[in-house]
Image: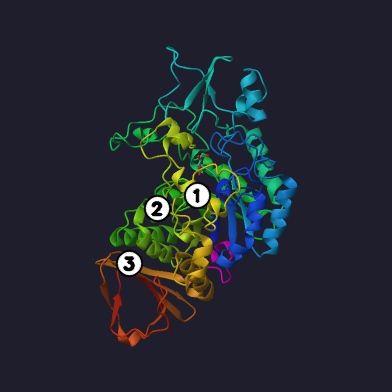
Amino acid sequence: MPSTFAWWQRGIIYQIYPRSFQDSNRDGIGDLDGILARLDYLVELGIDAIWISPIFPSPMADFGYDISDYTAIDPQFGNLAGFDRLVAAVHRHGLKIILDYVPNHTSDQHPWFRASRSSRRDPKRDWYVWRDGKADGSPPNNWISEFGGSAWQWDEATGQYYYHAFLKEQPDLNWRNPQVAEAMLAVMRFWLDRGVDGFRVDAIHHLIEAEHLRDNPPDPDWRQGQSPARRLIRLYSLDQEETHDAIAAMRALTDRYDGERVLIGEANLPIDQLMAYYGTHSPGFHLPFNFHLIKTRWEPGAIAALIEEYESALSAGAARWPNWVLGNHDRPRVATRVGREQARVAAMLLLTLRGTPTIYQGDEIGLVDTKIPPWRVQDPWEKNVPGLGLGRDPQRSPMQWDDSRNAGFTCGAPWLPLGDDYARVNVAAQAKDPRSMLALYRALIALRRREGALSVGIHLRAIAVGSILTFRRFHKGRWIKVALNFSAQPQQLDVDPSERWRILLSTELDRSNDGVASLLHLRANEGVVLGRTT
Ligand code: NOJ
């Protein structure tokens, strides 16, 4: 264990979904100048770094995850000069900036793909995954796109299929071709040279497919109503060995830059498979995103088991720093999933566990999913497979800043509807309320900063007793104990009186520095952080 910790180990990351954060030019879509205008808010919140979802030129078939030029800014968001201004301002504010890097696929409008599809003899033909159909003309195999339908798209002009793990407008790059790897590493260099502090690397487990392209086997656990892509076990289309060579090259390049640049990998995988993304033969990601808090049943026994499984998997390898995520632009909001009361407990969990926390914009004011009427649906997933609850618009509705028209997000017509609670649930109102969700986030973040045991301390044993989850943290003579009541009934927790704990923070924000005798009464949905010095 190093004696000093990097910023991305000590710090807290805040995800900005730029279309929905702050509009500055009245087009109803958030932009870079909007982010610039809200930096003070982020500093006050206490976070260390912003990760911005894609801001590059894009036809927006998948809202920026379909990139047609990797080294420019989409005019909807601003331009390169504005980006440079933002980087400088972020750094002036003492924050870091992380960009989204999308190596698995481009837009079908990217010049590389236009060239590739222009002819079988084009030098860029092999930059994408092209195959003949079967003898009967059907696609090369049974693979299903993540957004529904075959993962193969027929190209009439050149008489072959191309592979797309996501939309047909997002053709997969062929990372087995060294020219592709070289061109994509040059993209990283472009932004690192401009001063970005790292990347969140999109859909990394999709990067490379098995060369033989065999059919994926059916998943016997799949049920009607679940995502169509899950009909198959993605044995040959996901998480292939060779992916780790590509990640190692990304890491080697990043390590050549000064100033602790960070690489975060988006790989939605079980914990044992995730561990390989820290690196196999050579270093991989600093932080392979851990989405298991989002996916695990909200129940203390299940959460305790998850924490212990993750901690023990990490301990098998040196230099594996943990991280936790409660929400993002792809998943229903935590306050919707667990309820507004438990969302406070969830915030305390996220910000007291060992490992870098990532906060999704709006969770700090307890935003819930917004109901999207059918005629306002934007997300291609919902359009492709409607009615299964897979659409991601509800968690992407705009940030609620105040109670003015459109919640202060835009003076124009917002691209997605706002939550109908914005007159009540907004940053300005919560900033004035000492017991609001925002006040809780600020207090938890400040506490994490103050207490080394929380930011970098070791983790000791998560256990569930009845409805209460507890665990401890320790650093340099300082003990922290976290106790979270997952139920809507009051609970009692036995405390060893000889340990002389004091309450540092309650999710209710109404007690601190009280000593704890032999019993701690936790109110419904209450979590507390206790501290003591040895
Ligand atoms: C994961 C991103 O988070 C999601 O929004 C996107 O649709 C897919 N990758 C494809 O890029």
Q: Position of residue 467 (x, y in %)?
A: 26, 66
How far is disc 3 from disc 1 in space, using C-alphas? 36 Å
Q: Main secondary structure of the magenta part?
A: loop
Residue labelled 1 has its Cβ within 8 Å of some atom of ligand 1:
no
Q: Tell me which residue sits at (53%, 38%) in the image.
A: 207
Mark 3 / mark 2, whichever is N-terminal: 2
Q: Tell me which residue sits at (32%, 67%) in the image.
A: 525
Picture layout, residue 433 above or below residue 36: below
Dot 1: few (<14), some (14–19), or many (≥20) neighbours within 10 Å? many
- Closest to the observer: 300 or 277? 300
Marks 2 and 1: in contact by CB < 8 Å? no
Q: Is residue 282 left or right of residue 187?
A: left
In terms of secondary structure, where does tag 3 sit?
loop
Q: Check the image and tell me how it is coloured.
A: rainbow
Q: Place residue 50 in its image quadrant.
A: bottom right
Q: Place residue 173 in its image quadrant.
A: top right
In the picture, the disc for residue 13 is: none
Picture layout, residue 413 above or below residue 521: above
- Residue type highlighted by circle 2: Ile
To which residue does mark 3 refer?
Answer: 525
Would residue 456 be seen by someone viewing this image from the given angle?
A: no
Q: Which residues are magenta?
A: 1-10
To which residue does mark 2 refer?
Answer: 294
Instruction: Please tell me whether residue 48 belongs to the stretch shown in magenta.
Output: no
Instruction: Please tell me whether residue 6 belongs to the stretch shown in magenta.
Output: yes
Q: Nearer the viewer, mark 3 or mark 1?
A: 3
Dot 3: few (<14), some (14–19), or many (≥20) neighbours within 10 Å? many
Q: Is residue 270 left or right of residue 83?
A: left
To which residue does mark 1 refer?
Answer: 277
Picture layout, residue 11 above or below residue 450: above
